[in-house]
Amino acid sequence: MKKVLPFMKKYLIYAISSPILMILEVLGDIIIPYLMSLIVDVGIANRDINYIVNTGLIMIGAALLAMLFGVLSAHAGARAGYGFASEIRKETFKKVQEFSFANLDQFSVPSLITRLTNDCNTLGQVTMMSLRMAIRAPFMMIFALIMAVNINASLTFIFLISIPVTAILMFVTLKKARPLFINLQSKVDRVNAIIQENLAGIKVVKSFNRQSYEEKKFKERNDDLKANALKAISLVVFLMPLLNVVIYSTIGAVLWFGGKQVVAGTMGGGELISFITYITQIMMSLMMISFFFMQLLRGSASLNRILEVLNTESEIKEVSNPISELKDGSVTFKNVSFSYPSSSEKVLKNINFHINSGEVLGIIGSTGSSKSTLVQLIPRLYDVTEGTVEVGGVDVKKYDLKSLRDQVAFVLQKNVLFSGTIRENMKWGNENATDEEIIRALKHAQAWEFVSKFEDGLDHRVEQGGDNFSGGQKQRLTIARALIKSPKILVLDDSTSAVDMTTDAKIQKIFKEELGHITTIIIAQRISSIQHADRIIVMHEGEVESIGNHEELIEKSPIYREIFESQQKGVIAE
């Protein structure tokens, strides 16, 4: 709780006022049964109409005030509870943004979505209940117990039996419910996972006509979630009738013993009525406490899941007094080896090479040779396990992370465009970019040829994920977005695979002739995309097999030669 309580600071006034207003509401509810007993034992007994009317008006006033305090308490509690959840959600989202790729490998995307939505909402609900129900129930029980003792202390011995019985029932039920509520959130994760996977790949599902298979998979997980939820709810359902039995048994005992006292004249009829009302309030308070603890268990599970994210430290650490200026775009790998945090197996082994500033470097190799992992070490998306990566002659770990990543533009294999307009997407590279700068970058990426045909030009709408553009168009737009950053280093990770060979050749020519000041690293499967590079690295099973230009590699690299010959045969066959 020490970790999350500071998030309540902004809503402290509501967090304080809600329980105070709730106590005032309880006082109003407590006074009403007492006034009712006076009406019966004094007003009706003496046939005093004025007394009955006046006391009745006081009852109405107390009820209205209690209702007003209740409404204000509910409003303040909701502001505090959901405001608190909003702050935690914002901080959790911010924490996720700070994660390295290694951290993101620890949490699945569906799990993070559940934590940011369902778990935060649950925490907001429990916080609101803590400010209201957790205050109302104990205060109601204490005040009602005081009033009951004040009316007839001899009848309160009945509580010596009913309250312990109720407490035992609550303890046993909560003990059984706890693991079910903890498990419930993981079941929600599993359902979210299959929903996300299915919706992301809905076109593939339909093209393979696998709707029935996906529906069956979803049904299994959905039924599993339902079964777990029903188990948890069934305990609540089972507890309520048991508590009702205790309540009615207590009321029956009071009526039996209290009735005898009324007949004997030692207790008034109105006092008996109010005593029963106070008993009901006490027992209902116990039921509210049990329900609150049920929710608290679920809230505790959600809090633990959120704390798992908040307590996760980024694998990427910055040094004190980091360097904020990159001298140039040169890159050096010195004895670099890398293994993922969850594995001891090295996916990169003893990598050594140097890239001159402004050089165009191609990287090729078989699938699984860790080409993408290699370049992700440059902007510290991952940190090396052994050795050093230098940019501008300085170890990347000595740079300010933001400054480093601002100067290293990345176009990943999966091209992601965000909903909005083309202009808004381009400004991800530079939020202050002018239309002229955007158009120039689009021209360099060979994207202006289709963007210029839209009637609304740069204001053309981009649907979520860029689904209203073809694969090749998305690739060219993401290249343009990277160029707007005016980086010192540009990494294209197989980002022209969906572009036709003619357009690809134009892009390579632009890089060579007009963007010579940018160090360009191109990962490709097609040799035609990199054969004009200054040098080419051939990767094989996490190691550098050969380095050289196209002609040199044809002579000395059997892997490169094999790839080239197989692709040449494919071109001839076409």
Image (cartoon, grey):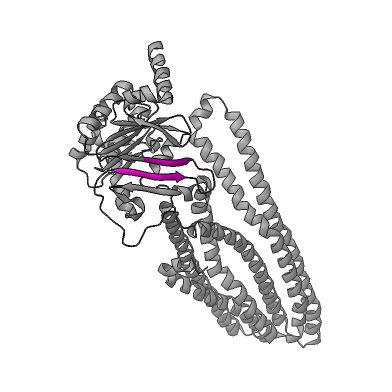
Location of residue 62 by image quarter: bottom right
Q: Position of residue 564 (x, y in %)?
A: 39, 21
Give the residue drawn at x 22%, y 44%.
433
Q: Is residue 514 left or right of residue 142?
A: left
Query: Can residue 526 be seen in this snapshot?
Result: no
Residue 344 falls inside the magenta stretch: yes
Residue 500 appears anywhere in the view: yes
In x, y percent, where is residue 542? Answer: 46, 37
What span is in magenta? 329-352
Residue 334: say if magenta: yes
Foreground: 401 or 240? Answer: 401
Q: Is residue 220 above or below residue 397?
A: above
Residue at the farthest front position:
556
Q: Residue at x 67, y 70 (%)?
A: 286
How many numbered circles are shown? Answer: 0
Instruction: Return the residue nearer the eye: 282 or 47.
Output: 282
Q: Nearer the viewer, residue 278 or 363?
A: 363
Q: Residue at left 58%, top 70%? A: 134
When the figure is inspected, residue 424 is found, relative to residue 90, above or below; the finding is: above
Name the residue located 43 percent from the left edge and 56 percent from the top edge.
95
Position of residue 323 in the picture relative to residue 51 (left or right): left
* Placement of 304 over or under 571, stated as above or below: below
Task: Determine the residue located farthest toward the top in the rendered image.
Answer: 573
Q: Position of residue 335 (x, y in %)?
A: 41, 45
In this rendering, the answer to whether 556 lies above or below 568 is: below
Image-based side of 210 in relation to 314, left or right: right
Q: Nearer the viewer, residue 463 or 36?
A: 463
- View extreme (bottom): residue: 266
Figure quadrant of residue 191: top right
Quadrant showing the C terminus: top left
Residue 84, x across and y down, in percent: 46, 63
